Image (spheres, rainbow, N blue to C red):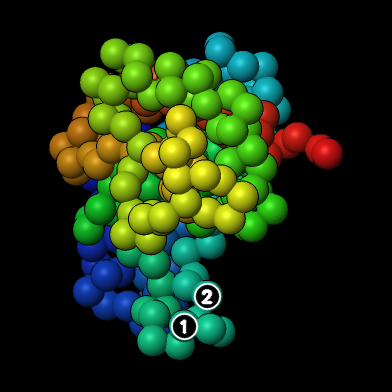
Amino acid sequence: MVQKDYIFRFLRDLRNNNSKEWMNENRERYHTMKKRWLEEIELILERFSKHDDFFAGVNPKKTLSRINNNRRFHPNKPVYKDHITCSPAGRKRYDHSTFFISIGPNNSFIGGGIYHPSKENLDKIRDAIDYEGVTLQKILNTNSFKSFYGGLNEYEDKLVTSPQGYNSDHKFINLINHKSYTATIELTEDQVVSDNFVDLVEEAYLKFKPLDEFLVKAISFEN
């Protein structure tokens, strides 16, 4: 079993000593932490491959995001992130799955969706809701999805009035007004380090999968 408590210890120390100097002094610890997370990802991909052969061909290293923050446009950000991630379908791979995992001492969560999609993809999702809103509504209203995720995440930038091209009395205007389409649950550190973490991730993926397929189909549509 992967020692995920080691991962949290490293990330907590990184959060409290966020500098290149500290990272250079603890480079070996970083690589050990990364190795243990990759071992966990291998278990996750193996489990997912039982439901979709696609995941059997994913390189675990390709599922990770860089731990360095991009400070080019946000120079006030810390040098390093205090969390690690996994996109089981591969980084930026929205043509197959939007499922996502993030763990860290400040916040851990699993779920998926598309946060602040490009205008093109947002338009495609809204078009899909316009034509197949009943399908999405059924997905969101299933007991398995509602009991696990509660529904779509609500963000402050959700539109109050209808977007251009849609009437305010549209049957699915509440769904169309979203600017992000995500569903996630927060995790405690105890849940992440537990022996049944992979079971929990698998459950989260399977209950998210219908929404995942709806979103992937929407953004993959070519006019």
From the image, tell me which residue sits under label 1: 74
Q: Is residue 197 left or right of residue 205?
A: left
Name the quadrant of the N terminus.
top left
Other residues around mark 1 within 10 Å, as few (<14) / some (14–19) / many (≥20): few
From the image, tell me which residue sits under label 2: 70
Q: CA distance from mark 2 to mark 1?
A: 7 Å
From this view, report whether residue 146 is shown above or below residue 86: above
Dot 2 amino acid type: Asn
User: Which element is circle 1 on?
Assistant: loop
Give the mark count.
2
Where does the image place residue 103, in percent across and percent down from the top left? Answer: 33, 48
Name the quadrant of the C terminus.
top right
Where does the image place residue 105, in percent across and percent down from the top left? Answer: 23, 56
Q: Is residue 85 left or right of residue 193?
A: right
**Residue 216 visible somewhere in the drawing:** no
Where does the image place residue 134, in percent across and percent down from the top left? Answer: 50, 20
